[in-house]
Image: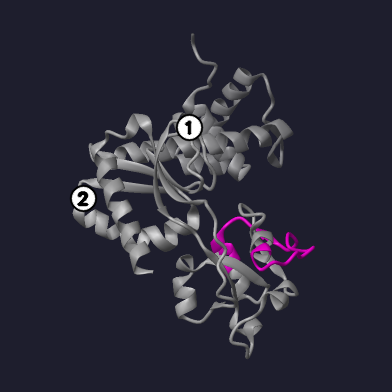
Amino acid sequence: MRRKIPSTAALISFEAAARHESFTKAAQELSLTQGAVCRQIASLEEFLSVELFRRSRRGVKLTEAGLSYSRRIATQLDAVERDTLSVMGQQGANVIELAVVPTFGTQWLLPRLKDFQKQHPEVTVNLTNRTRPFLFADTSFDAAIYFGDADWSGTQSHRLMGEHPVPVCSPAILGNHQQLNAETIAELPLLQQTTRPYAWRQWFNSQQMSIPRDMTGPRYELFSMLAQAAMHDMGIALIPAFLIQRELAEKRLVIANPQALTSIKAYYLMIPERKVESASLRAFRDWLVNQANSYNLGK
């Protein structure tokens, strides 16, 4: 069955015209005549049976339908461009598309990835941020690193390390104290992590304390955001020390209390069962597990 899709040329002309809200500027960007752009957009409007622009002597302006459609089309064209560049860049190479939780990827994995490249120059590892589980069948990912309990259907899991976050803050908040007790911490603004909504409650419970406001405070999705907020004296945060090693070494953050929060959850490498025989993935798995073991032994 033929797909109900307009021509790519018409979509590209429309996206450029919508972005500039000008047929003239779109024509200049695309190296076309203004008339050619007008015809492409007119053919698209006829195809859709929807008016995308209102024309006047002063120029063109997107309709509500045109604005909504332009946003969707821009996203889809960006995806097509990324996929095209990815295929062009591979040129037969072994490529691993890895989904990774953001701060772990930037703070722990990336500083070590050069070692894998040296050992396996034939394999390229591409990283994309994903904070929650997904269906591998619906994506192009070959594997994922995520924090959880390894309960991910259709995958093979490899435990890397636990998290063990500790309360951290700026030196200004710590002041002249060597550390802050739980009672003092309970009085400070508590910075919350969106994907760990009960972290502070669990930490206070481990201190045999019940704090009514343990789930209040600004919420941030990433540990890197928490770290920035803490460095700017906005409050105290629970962050794994291995994700803020530079900040701790440079004294931009300090450990306010050494009591770590323990959890049965951990960072895992997840590989879909249909991919477990891939030679490049096996090489990456073995390298990554070895790196995690070396880190765990060196703590």
Drawn side of residue 270 relative to residue 290, left or right:
right
Q: Which residue is outermost to the right?
A: 212
Q: Amino acid at mark 2?
A: His
Q: Residues within 10 Å of mark 1 (few under 14, many from 20)?
A: few
Q: Amino acid at mark 1?
A: Ser
Q: Which residue is outermost to the bottom?
A: 176
Quarter of the view holding residue 166: bottom right
* Range covered by the magenta-colored residues: 205-227
Q: Residues within 10 Å of mark 2 (few under 14, many from 20)?
A: some
Look at mark 2 in the image and give the residue it sits on.
Answer: 120
Q: Is residue 23 visible?
A: no
Q: Please tell me whether residue 226 belongs to the stretch shown in magenta.
A: yes
Look at mark 1 in the image and give the residue it sits on.
Answer: 153
Question: Residue drawn 60% across and 82% down?
Answer: 179
Q: Residue 83: give x, y in percent of width and height.
A: 40, 37
Please tell me which residue lies in front, 22 or 283: 283
Mark closest to the chain's N terminus, 2 or 1: 2
Quadrant that contains the C terminus: bottom left
Question: Residue drawn 49% across and 59% down?
Answer: 163
